Image (cartoon, coloured by chain):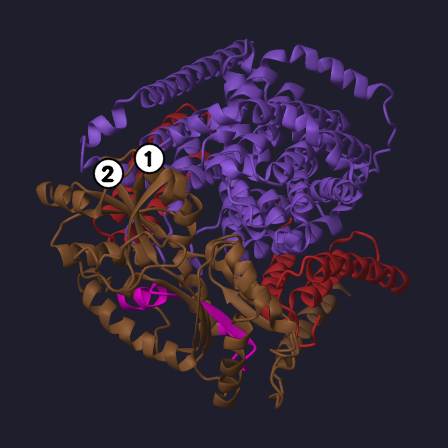
Chain colours: A brown, B purple, C red
Amino acid sequence: MRKFLAGIMCCSLLLCAAVAQARSAADSYPDAPLTLVVVYTPGGATDLQARISAIKAQDPKYFGQPMVILNKPGAGGMSGWNWFMDRGSKDGLTITAYNMPHFIAQSIVNKTRYNINTFEPLGNWGADPAVLCVAKDSKFKSVDDLVKFARENPGKLTINGAGLYVGHHIATLQLQKAAGLKVTYIPEKGGTDALQSVLSGKVLAGFNNLADVYRSQDRLTILAVADVKRHEFLPDVPTFRELGIDIDDASVNFRGYAMPKGVDPAIVEKAAKILPAMFNDPEVVKRMRESGSPMLVMDREQVKKMFVEKQKTLEALLKDLRND
Amino acid sequence: MEQFLLHLPLVFDWMNLLALLAGTVGGLFFGAMPGLSPTMAVALLVPITFYMPPATSLILLGAVYTSAVAGGSISAILLSIPGAPASIATLFDGHTMAKQGRAQEALYTTFVSSFIGGVFGVMVMILFSPPMAEFAMRFGPSELFWTAIFGITVITGLSSGAVLKGLFGGALGVLLSTVGYSTLTGEPRFVVHDALASGITMVPALIGFFAVPQIIDLMENSHILLEKLTFKPEKGMLRKVVMAHRKYLRTLAMGCGLGTLIGVVPGAGGNVAGIMVYDQARKLDKHPERFGTGDPEGVCASECANNATVAPAIIPLLTLSIPGSPTAAVLLGGLLIHGLFPGPDLFTEKAEVTYTFIAGLFLAQFTMLIFGLLASRYSHLVANAPNYMMFAAVMILCVFGSYCVQNSYEDVLVMFTLGVLMFVMGKFGFPSAPIVLGLILGPIAEENFLRGEMIAETNVGVFNYFFTGTLNIVLIALCVLSLAWGLYSEVKFARKMKAQAAAQAGE
Amino acid sequence: MYKELCSALIMTVIIILFAIPMTDLSGESREVPQLLIIAMSVINAGQYIQAVIKIAGRLDVRVTLAGYPGLRVGILFGLTVVYLMALQTVGFYISSLIYFFVTSLLAQPMKITPVLAARRFVVCLLCIGFLYGLFTVSLKVQIPLSPLGI
């Protein structure tokens, strides 16, 4: 009797698995709830902004279906994006939130299963530039002070950031190249950790997200912003270019939606058309502003161009750091 | 303090009260299920609080956090599976008591001690937030490194009679924690299979190490029908337990004090406080051997400490945006979703929400005590469940628990694999607690060591960086003392064993 | 098999398992693992010494498999492995239900009667249903479901 039962269990499970294939292609998209794969932990900056960006998905004006967030954190995003390429459904119902320059840098330095050619961008919602900041009581009062110190003491200037190959790291590399300096980059575990190290004087300076720095303005001196133009949240902070150091927006943290390659092009176009309107919805804009998250809405064509440009810049910058 | 009293009545608004009660019951339940941890409970609820008013959602999350930490002891005592890393030390004495039929006493002790520790923690939060925050800020890479090392020296105390295996386990735990992509160099380490790319996640590993061997043991005994324990609520058990706490004054003081300090230190926080205080309580006692034989004071030490860390872990979160524990880190998300940014603003502009939250946290200690004691009266239901259903039930819960941490099936596989390995090793005398401790503290020790090295090379030099500075020296002294004492008591224990063996042989 | 000696052997196996991939590492990533492997080797040496002392002093314990219900544990363990493999394709809830029902019937010492089996199935269904209500419905956790949507 018992052996029989054991046999039945194995057979029934195997049978169910065999049945697991049927999935008819949908004509009217989307016909089921969408999944947004966020490759960072719940509560982090990307997760927070992703959730805000998706609040209105259910509105018939946009997708007409709710968008459910699926967190897949690990290895700075690599685990989640690799999973997304392997197991993300190709029916247009699984979308991921991309983080630039993170995923491009990772695809250059490590052997990942994704790169700019495997992600079909749909639209961009946010652009968070990196800003250089020091503690309020620091001896550096301007970028010039910092650069002078670094020139006189090569390698002794410690600049931190929220990890490796993230925007902050890229900004540091650009600073080194553009001003001819040698600094020591200290990767931290996350944006808030990095900010705390700067505030308590453990490192001399730090690159951090504009959103996080903006909230702690009273305890920091913000020296410059690594972007092509000044930012509306911080109108008094100059860009590096204004100060004579040629840094462009390669380190700006762009965030948006992407689908895996292989999804029906008609579905991709349809989703891409809906997104800019959804991101510009007044409710979304209001919540983003309230949480201090800077927005920059771009459509599919603009993002595709941006991917290609950034790939070139980052390949040049990261040439020396490949992990083969 | 006045702000606190001012906002206390706000908690009694019906929605907040509902959140408080739901959070307490939910948290106890989550903590009690093997495989579901406080961090996960809070993480799962954060998205749901998106649509609630700020004060209500924070009260809900705070109540869940507090009760889940206390609830973890329920499964530790009854099933020998800690509901969270914080409850590991509870099972040393708690489960032994359960096997002696004193489960109810153990559970009552848990909740009374947790209550005392928790209230102390919240009072510290109300009265001493600024100086505590200041203290937390002083912990840079070198200080955090020595704190982690101090935690690791505790391992010598966790494995009496099998010191070598315990130390090996600790080292193995730290080695396991290096699996994955290094935060500091970005290089993949020991990633022989894709499932390991994001490293060994702590909760699935915890579940694997403690629960799976238990499950396999249950399989072994699944054909045995135990006699149903008839349940007679012992009259006056509660009073007896409360009175007993008067004798535990020193342990309680240590639990509250050390627990609060450990809780505020950014990083591991509550996860290790229980073990550390248990170990220190044992080392400083006249009769260390009674710990582990079913002495309620052991349960008291562990539980008082782990609940004392709850509120202090939130202090640096609210003031500086640095979480004092992994669960507090998830709470940060809960704050940000409502536009509450950590910093001085929280106590001035948004004071109403913040103080209502703190008041809610205070009251949560009371609701936890009440519901916890209530739940303990029905603990016999679990104890009486038949073995042939238990192992599958526990296995299923472990699968769900491991999966939910990171929505990852790979974690389930890691959990099971580690568990089977631990089962085999356990049969040869390897203790599981040191491996888990190594796994938790390893990353803290290594990252801060390497980061400190990087910074030190640019100014004062590695030796100076790690060995000078008042806080550093204090921590190093603690490590040395802890290690020395551990070795000393180990030698004493060995001598005693030899004497006993000689005496027996002589008879 | 002597317990202490086997423990020492287990330690050696573990050290070798970690030492092999470690040769791929370099620089800073290698520092800490290398330190640990060295420490573990020292401890291992100590364990061998302890094992030898205990065997010589007739203090060691033999570990045997006699009396261990290998068949029962083996079957239940095997079914558990099948369950874990089936989770992703068949869906968590259905495979858990089948696993729970079948293993509890297999493991019990009492005779299986149709009435008992039916009652057991209802109990299992309620338990799994409760988990479904908790995780998928209330907490909205993305648990892999079967193609049938459960």
Q: Numbered disc 1: what chain?
A: B
Q: Is residue A104 magenta?
A: yes
Position of residue B195 in the picture relative to residue A159 (left or right): right
Residue behind mark 1: B141
Q: Quadrant of residue A111?
A: bottom left
Residue in the image at 30% along x and 35% along y: A202
Start-end of magenta stretch: A87-110
Position of residue A183 in the picture relative to residue C119 (left or right): left
Residue behind mark 2: B455
Residue in the image at 51% along x and 15% along y: B501
Residue B110 seen in this snapshot: no
Three-letter amino acid code of the residue under disc 2: Ile
Q: CA distance from mark 2 to mark 1?
A: 9 Å
Front residue of B339 and A15: B339
> Mark 2 and 1 residues: CB-CB less than 8 Å, in contact?
yes
Three-letter amino acid code of the residue under disc 1: Pro
